[in-house]
Amino acid sequence: MSVTRKDVEHIAELARLKFKDEELQNFTEQLNEILAYMEQLNELDTENIEPLSHTIEGGNVFRQDVVKPSLDREHALKNAPDEDDVFFKVPKVIPGA
């Protein structure tokens, strides 16, 4: 399979791209080189190879959900620039609210 200049022009038109004649020629050559390289894959013997969806088999990568103690309120509010005994106080960011 090969790509013609007309194919490249059509793809460029679909993508609403404009190229100079020199660029169209370069793209045509480059796409054909890529396709020729990919054709080498057809030479591989894949008769006894099972298809796979991922190259690395992986299991559950999540950690166990373990309850741990969190910061107490006083410690969390210790470095707050402004607080109200229970909450962080922040500047109003929504006008009119």
Image: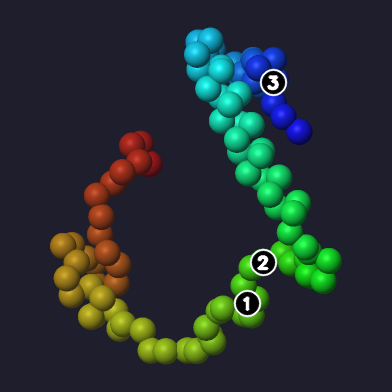
**Image quadrant for the N terminus?**
top right
User: Does 18 appear above or below 3?
Assistant: above
Please tell me whether mark 2 sits on a helix, a strand or a loop: loop
Q: CB atoms at circles 2 and 1 under 8 Å apart?
A: yes
Most extreme residue toward the right, as rendered?
47
User: Does 65 appear above or below 25?
Assistant: below
How far apart in space, not on screen, are marks 3 and 2 (Cα)? 34 Å
Instruction: Give me the residue at 52% from left, 83% from top.
Output: 63
Instruction: Give the residue pinned by disc 1.
Output: 58
Q: Tell me which numbered mark, 3 or 2, is placed earlier along the sequence.
A: 3
How far apart in space, not on screen, are marks 1 and 3 (Cα)? 42 Å
Instruction: Give me the residue at 82% from left, 71% from top.
Output: 48
Q: Nearer the viewer, residue 60 or 11?
A: 11
What x and y, as percent, mark residue 76?
A: 26, 76
Q: Quadrant of residue 18?
A: top right
Instruction: Give the residue pinned by disc 3.
Output: 4
- Amino acid marked by disc 2: His
User: Does 57 appear above or below 70?
Assistant: above
Could one spot residue 14 in this view of the protein?
A: no
**Image quadrant for the C terminus?**
top left
Q: Residues within 10 Å of mark 3 (few under 14, many from 20)?
A: some
Q: Nearer the viewer, residue 51 or 95?
A: 51
Most extreme residue toward the front, as rendered?
43
Please tell me whether mark 3 sits on a helix, a strand or a loop: loop
Instruction: Give the residue pinned by disc 2.
Output: 54
How far apart in space, not on screen, are marks 2 and 1 (Cα)? 9 Å
Q: Residues within 10 Å of mark 2 (few under 14, many from 20)?
A: few
Q: Is residue 53 left or right of residue 17?
A: right
